Amino acid sequence: MNKKVAFYTLGCKLNYSETSSIGRIFQDAGYETTAFNSPADVYVINTCSVTDNADKKCRKVVKEALKHSPNAYITIVGCYAQLKPREIAEIPGVDMVLGAAEKFNIIAHINDLTKREKAVVHNAPIDETHQFVSAYSIGDRTRTFLKVQDGCDYSCTFCTIPLARGESRSGKIDDIVRQAEEIAASGVKEIVLTGVNIGDFGIRNGKRQDRFLDLVLALDEVDGIDRIRISSIEPNLLSNEIIEFVARSKRFVPHFHMPLQSGSNNVLGMMRRRYKRELYAERVAKIKSLMPDCCIGVDVIVGFPGETREDFFDTYNFLNEMDISYLHVFTYSERENTIAAQMEGAVPGVQRSDRSKMLHILSEKKRRAFYETQLGRIGHVLFESDVKDGYMHGFSKNYVKVRYLYDPLLVNELIPVKFTSISVNGEMDVEELPALLTHG
């Protein structure tokens, strides 16, 4: 009988793509994948260092795994495993910790699955991690996350990602196109391009060899994929050329997620971001001039050291006045080995929380205002298999979340709909249209 492996992923879309690829490595080695809440011989937990309480979350997931299989072999991988391997090795029940360079060689490290008194750690220094390992998620959702880039050469003062993932590096365009063709052949309708800093795509062996625009142009020619979505891109790397191409492309959708982090130039300087708010506003204006229905998401951090009340309201007013669609709000928390953790002017926790609440309310206001501009319009929705309270869900090209009474025939189908009303949950209600009414 095949040994069973189960996975749990904390963190970003990039982590999900890598977990899926590690899953295929196990399948090739003869393992059967099972649900995390089922008995298994091996549990692999892919961790994140960006969100709060990484240690607490990791401990909780390990405890949950051992509840299902007390003698299972527990392996921890991911960003937190690279940053704090010794800390993780002390968690009761953990057998192995693999750093960034070792996680894709997991089968070679696992050996005989014997439980150990002390966890084994394989964790090379991050500056020895130079290889790009491709990854994509498949078989578990309507859309696929395709990893095109890893690592980051930026030095933002709050961020641990360069310490956890190393230098910026990318795959070859030909290889990524081939993977996109494989994904298309599997029946997936949408690809989401992921990476740590995807706008910096094109560095191999320490040298720039391609541009992100070159990749975008090549992927737009892949037959069988209806939609390609760019997950997140720095405003200084989202060139006018890219925006103009997306506006006329066959497959790239009108949806950009651009991290801002602060609307105060003073705070942006302390963060060592590579742009000022004026450039961000230019990018938004350019996008909206070419794609008025485009959805624009924004990352923003509140409570950064030295952020005054005036700085925060600079951010709030800047976002309030801009034609954006939603916010991802992060409350600043100190990270070891970052410059920001040593900075003076720590913002009290209560103020951080208050500022976060204000921006969450603003985000809901922005999302609703954006959805209201779509009422009465016709769009195509890609429906997913999740069902809640009798409704299935999906997204339009421009990332409007739609709900519709569950119909198994609609799963993984692009359906023409008319946006009719906004539900109490903030999702868009629609009516299905005959396919002949509209195309694309």
Image (tube, helix red, strand yellow):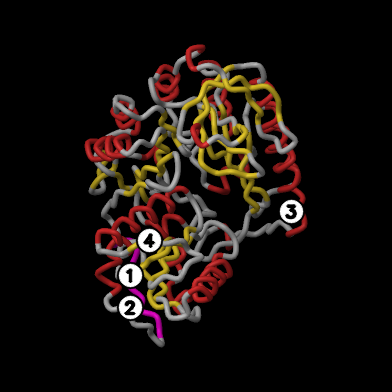
Q: Residues within 10 Å of mark 2 (few under 14, many from 20)?
A: some
Judging from the image, what secondary structure is the residue with disc 3 in? helix
Q: Which residue is depicted at the point 28% across and 72% down?
A: 109
Report which residue position mark 1 lands on: 3
Residue designated by label 3:
353
Q: CA distance from mark 2 to mark 3?
A: 44 Å
* Nearer-N-terminus badge (4/2): 4
Q: Nearer the viewer, residue 100 or 384?
A: 384
Categorize mark 1 by other alpha carbons within 10 Å: few (<14), some (14-19), many (20+).
Answer: some
Identify the residue position indicated by label 4 in the image: 33
Which mark sits nearer the N-terminus, 4 or 3? Answer: 4
Image quadrant holding the N terminus, namely bottom left
Q: Quadrant of residue 229?
A: top left
Quick one: label 4, few (<14), some, or many (20+) residues within 10 Å?
Answer: some
Under mark 3, the amino acid is Ser
Q: Is residue 139 above or below residue 412?
A: below
Mark 1 or 2, which is nearer the eye? 1
- Disc with the residue nearer the chain's start (1 vs 2): 1
Reply above or below: 224 against 111: above
Judging by the rendered image, the residue that carries numbered circle 2 is 113
* Spatial CA span between label 1 and label 2: 10 Å
Q: Are the residues at dot 1 and dot 2 in contact (C-beta closer than 8 Å)?
A: yes
Q: Secondary structure at mark 2?
A: loop
Q: Secondary structure at mark 1?
A: loop
